[in-house]
Image (cartoon, helix red, strand yellow):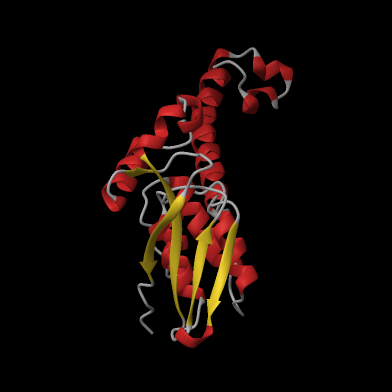
Amino acid sequence: MENNRLLSMLPFLYQNSEYIKGIQNGFESERLVLEKEAIDFYNSLFVDSATWSLEFWESFLGVKSISNDINERRNVIKNKLKFRGITNFNAIKELCSQYGYGEIEINEKFDEGKFTIRFISKEGEPDNIKDLVTQINSIIPAHVGYDFNFTYMYWKEIKNQTWKNAKEYTWNSIRKSDEKLNKKIAIPGSKTIPGEIYPSQGVKR
């Protein structure tokens, strides 16, 4: 076995022995397996490199991502770790930014006991909106409600758009936009209309 680390640590007189080489090659095979397992376990201790251990992180924090995508599951876990304690609008804005939703504004409605989150720098409904809802529900008081406001474009406004402008969207997100708003599509542009308001799902305490 080439590059045998164990063999290279022996006195040079042993390194030329075929008998010793055979023994050390067997040891080296097992060492490589143990090294791989040790690295994998070490990676599982950190959210950014964890794979199979994500379910333990989720169980420990009491969260469950809607998505099966590893990176999105990691984001849910990291956001849960980060946003603990007192909740304010700055924390909610930062939470939304962690999901890549761009710039948002929050409008308070004191008489209704709720607030509206409006996405102002991106059009359409994000694919992982359910994960964001779960995270917000976990940090806001149970008596406070909220909803979302999105912006969309009409199909007729797409004729001046290019595939380059649309490349950041998946066809699934386009279809969802079309289904929700009757021939309206989430494509970047200057002409936007108010999107559908999504009510809060509430919090079970």
Residue 67 appears in the picture as rendered: yes
Left or right position of 174 against 188 = left
Residue 24 in the image, given as x and y percentages of width and height: 56, 25
- One can see residue 51 in this view: no
**Number of numbered callouts drawn:** 0
Residue 45: % across, % down: 56, 55
Left or right: 139, with 158 as reference point: right
Pick the front one: 20 or 129: 129
Towards the viewer: 46 or 191: 191
Residue 198 picture location, percent across and down: 37, 65
x and y, in percent, of residue 12 in the image? 73, 17
State which quarter of the image contains the N terminus.
top right
**90 to the left or right of 136:** right
Relative vertical location of residue 181 with respect to residue 4 in this rendering, above or below: below
**Residue at image location 61% in from the left, 22% down from the top:** 4
Q: Which one is in front, 142 or 115?
A: 115
Q: Which residue: 65% across, 69% down?
A: 90
Decide: is 17 above or below 108: above
